[in-house]
Image: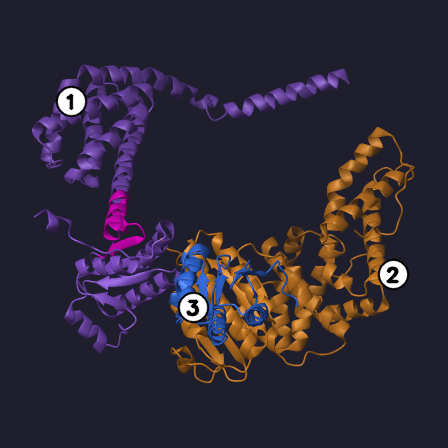
Chain colours: A purple, B blue, C orange
């Protein structure tokens, strides 16, 4: 029994200890390569550090030849290329892309507003990869076998760097676009609580069905949150009010009413009103008032306020 | 009567009836609710009725129409009806479906409904008292 | 849970090596029982029962014969279990499992059932019958069958599934003792039995089941056999209360793929309208709701009935049209609520409304 249990322990040790190591450990056949990488990369880094100024300048001029990053001033270019270069070498040295990722995101944030395109960013990183590879060719050209091993060590790292930078840039760009979309959406359908129980919904821009539906949803939710009794929908800023938009307005007014809020439409020009009536939109159910000012006065009357001019007595 | 307290409740408060629907009703339950409510309006000579539908997650054409019928019948029996608590999503779906509650008055919640009734009913009830 | 007759033998051998030998039989017994008894709990009972018996008899059985002994025991237990169940619930066995009991104890089963299976088997071709028996009774695996037939294991398995599906249908028909009323019945029942959706669509299975009383009855155990899928729900509509069930079912399903609250309400409202149309105009039918991924994420609702049909679909879709008192908002309203909407109707045959709501991006 005792022997059995010892064997069991051994077996489980092998199993438990062996498996997790597998991804990091290298099979015997590759052990030599691994050593090579360990030894060669420091050599490489030392080489790139030594020729930093020359290689960086060469890279910068290649960027100029390729007409990339033209949105940037020469000073900015010099500063950024230096940073990219140093980060690049650091990744080769440490094997960790974290710092580079951080820097790439940071850089993207700075250059995206200036209109730098994805192909430019990928382009400059590939150029740097190229410049450095050429310098390695030059240095190791006598020893072809050694050169091969150096490139074996360099290329995967360089590819990883190019990948990291490109992905960071695209991620950042998408984030900016999303942010802008949200901002536009919010800007275009604000529900403004102007005073207790009164909401204003100014509609600005083109009202497609998707936006119209968002707008209605937002308004209904706001009615509940603010316990609104009156809603003023101002369409002065909506360029085209066609049948579809008008029907949507009618439904929005109906839905507001179902929640116990009366709606007033303002900013409906006489021409549009006439068109709507000719195409058969039923405006009779809607409380329409020419301008926002009048609409607000009507809303306040509905809420039981009376508006008096304070400065009349002061003058 | 199979409509128990679990599905709906009808409470009397002074000259008002407050009817709350607690859960989704099928068509026949809805009809029974309607009959029950109308009967109680007559029994108590109610002047106002509040129907709280806050618990309903759907008001389809049948549901909307029944509410409208209740309001109409209640009016014929001398009571004013207010429907309260329609959820934003439900209101949205109702108008997309093409339903409204017609001329029935609606309010945000019970409190608003009561405020509306007292503003309307007291003024007209001066005649009867 | 029904216990299958026999009492547990308490007098079991305690020798550890026998125990471990018996324990090693567990997966095989489980497989044999699992293939014949679909109810999990009942299958577990049978596996336990078998092992207890094998354990009790272990010292009497010749070395090396333990495995065949266990197989035989398991089959006997299953067969006698069936017999017992049969006595209690006359028809329960049809729901539990419809495949022919592959045991040598067939004569123990009810004569009627025996005849039914024989009759059903007679409907198969020689080749189909041989393959089925070789697999089910002799336990020959699909790979060696494939080798014999110069085919692939996958093809053999697919063929076996089709054969089983046909066998189930023929078995049910034999039990009924009648031929189906129309020549559409057999293909429909086979498609339902095999669970092949494409085939079911091709033969118009859903509609046929609504029209044909016999197929409706026979298809019940056939459909219930197939496991419920995660991404669909089917609600039979026969009365008022089913309208509520249908819209709740649709809402719950749609909620799983992240529709907004507003959209969930919109979908539920549209389903409610269609379900009500079924109750009002056709009396009965069904609502089938499924999640779809292509070309976009969304939910599709199919409302189907075998009612009188709609004479003028155009007119029924026009706002304000109604054949029952008050409002005719059923169809046009539901169409406004959903993104896609089609109506197929044939006078005297019924109506199918298919509608889809896409999930908003973002």
- Numbered label attached to residue C108: 2
Q: Secondary structure at mark 2?
A: helix
x 63%, y 77%: residue: C212
Residue at the spot of label 1: A55
What's the chain of the residue with tag 1? A
Q: Secondary structure at mark 3?
A: loop
Of residues C79 and C323, the one nearer the viewer is C323
- Mark 3: few/some/many CA within 10 Å (<14, 14-19, 20+): few
| Location of residue A266 in the rendering, given as x and y in whole percent from the top left corner | 21, 62
x 44%, y 77%: residue: C327
- Picture layout, residue C195 above or below residue A117: below
| Location of residue C164 in the rendering, given as x and y in whole percent from the top left corner | 68, 63
Q: Which residues are magenta?
A: A178-203
Label 1 or label 3, whichever lies nearer to me, is 3
Label 1 or label 2, whichever lies nearer to me, is 2
The reply to whether residue C162 is in sight is yes
A118 to the left or right of C99:
left
Residue at the spot of label 3: B126
């Amino acid at each position: 029994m005792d022997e059995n249990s010892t064997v069991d322990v051994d077996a489980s040790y092998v199993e438990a200890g062996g498996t997790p190591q597998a991804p990091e450990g290298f099979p015997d056949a590759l052990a030599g390569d691994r050593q090579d990488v360990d030894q060669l990369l420091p050599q490489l880094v030392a080489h790139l550090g030594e020729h930093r100024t020359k290689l960086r300048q060469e890279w910068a001029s290649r960027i100029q030849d390729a007409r990339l990053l033209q949105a940037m001033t020469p000073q900015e270019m010099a500063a950024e290329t230096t940073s990219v270069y140093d980060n690049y070498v650091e990744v080769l040295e440490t094997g960790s892309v974290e710092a580079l990722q951080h820097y790439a995101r940071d850089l993207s944030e700075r250059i995206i507003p200036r209109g730098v395109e994805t192909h430019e960013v990928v382009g400059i990183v590939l150029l740097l990869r190229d410049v450095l590879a050429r310098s390695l060719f030059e240095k190791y050209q006598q020893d072809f076998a050694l050169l091969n091993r150096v490139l074996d060590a360099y290329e995967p790292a360089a590819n990883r760097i190019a990948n990291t930078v490109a992905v960071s840039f695209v991620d950042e760009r998408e984030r900016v676009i999303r942010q802008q979309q949200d901002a536009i959406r919010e800007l275009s359908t604000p529900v403004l609580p102007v005073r207790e129980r009164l909401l204003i919904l100014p509609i600005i821009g083109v009202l497609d069905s998707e936006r119209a539906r968002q707008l209605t949803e937002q308004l209904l939710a706001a009615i509940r949150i603010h316990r609104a009794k009156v809603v003023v929908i101002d369409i002065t800023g909506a360029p085209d009010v066609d049948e579809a938009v008008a029907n949507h307005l009618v439904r929005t007014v109906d839905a507001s009413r179902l929640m116990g809020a009366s709606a007033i439409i303002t900013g409906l020009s006489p021409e549009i009103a006439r068109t709507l009536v000719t195409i058969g939109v039923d405006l009779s159910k809607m409380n329409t008032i020419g301008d926002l000012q009048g609409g607000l006065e009507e809303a306040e009357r509905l809420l039981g306020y009376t508006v008096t001019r304070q400065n009349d007595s002061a003058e | 009567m199979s409509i128990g307290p679990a599905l709906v409740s009808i409470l009397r408060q002074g000259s008002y009836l407050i009817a709350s629907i607690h859960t989704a009703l099928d068509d026949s339950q809805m009809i029974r609710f309607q009959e029950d409510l109308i009967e109680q309006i007559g029994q108590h000579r109610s002047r106002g009725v509040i129907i709280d539908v806050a618990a309903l997650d759907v008001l389809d054409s049948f549901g909307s129409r029944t509410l409208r019928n209740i309001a109409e019948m209640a009016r014929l029996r001398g009571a004013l009806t207010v429907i309260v608590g329609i959820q934003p999503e439900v209101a949205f779906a109702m108008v997309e479906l093409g339903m409204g509650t017609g001329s029935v008055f609606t309010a945000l919640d019970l409190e608003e409904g009561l405020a509306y009734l007292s503003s309307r009913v007291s003024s007209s009830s001066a005649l009867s008292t | 849970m029904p216990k299958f007759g026999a009492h547990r033998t308490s007098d079991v051998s305690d020798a550890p090596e026998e125990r471990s030998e018996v324990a090693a039989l567990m997966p095989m017994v489980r497989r044999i029982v699992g293939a014949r008894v679909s109810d999990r709990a009942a299958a577990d009972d049978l596996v336990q029962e078998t092992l207890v018996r094998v354990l009790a008899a272990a010292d009497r059985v010749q070395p090396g014969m333990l495995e065949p002994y266990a197989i035989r025991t398991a089959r006997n237990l299953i067969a006698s279990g069936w017999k017992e169940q049969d006595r209690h619930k006359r028809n329960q066995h049809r729901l539990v499992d419809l495949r022919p009991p592959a045991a040598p104890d067939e004569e123990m089963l009810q004569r009627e059932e025996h005849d039914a299976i024989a009759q059903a088997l007679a409907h198969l071709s020689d080749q189909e019958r041989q393959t089925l028996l070789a697999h089910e009774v002799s336990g020959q695996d699909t790979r060696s069958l494939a080798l014999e037939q110069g085919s692939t294991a996958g093809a053999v398995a697919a063929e076996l599934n089709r054969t089983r599906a046909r066998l189930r249908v023929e078995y049910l028909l034999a039990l009924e003792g009648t031929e189906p009323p129309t020549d559409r019945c057999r293909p429909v029942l086979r498609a339902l039995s095999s669970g092949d959706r494409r085939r079911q669509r091709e033969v118009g299975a859903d509609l046929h089941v609504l029209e044909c009383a016999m197929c409706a009855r026979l298809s019940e155990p056939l459909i219930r056999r197939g496991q419920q899928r995660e991404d669909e729900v089917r609600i039979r509509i026969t009365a008022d209360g089913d309208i509520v069930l249908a819209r709740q079912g649709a809402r719950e399903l749609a909620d799983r793929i992240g529709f907004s609250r507003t959209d969930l309400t919109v979908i539920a409202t549209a389903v409610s309208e269609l379900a009500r149309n079924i109750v009002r105009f056709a009396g009965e039918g069904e609502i089938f709701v499924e999640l779809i991924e292509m070309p976009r994420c969304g939910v599709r609702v199919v409302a189907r009935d075998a009612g009188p049909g709609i004479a003028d679909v155009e007119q029924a879709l026009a706002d304000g049209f109604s054949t029952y008192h008050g409002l005719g908002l059923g169809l046009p309203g539901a169409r406004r609520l959903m993104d896609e909407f089609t109506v197929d109707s044939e006078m005297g045959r019924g109506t199918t409304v298919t509608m889809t709501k896409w999930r908003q991006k973002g």
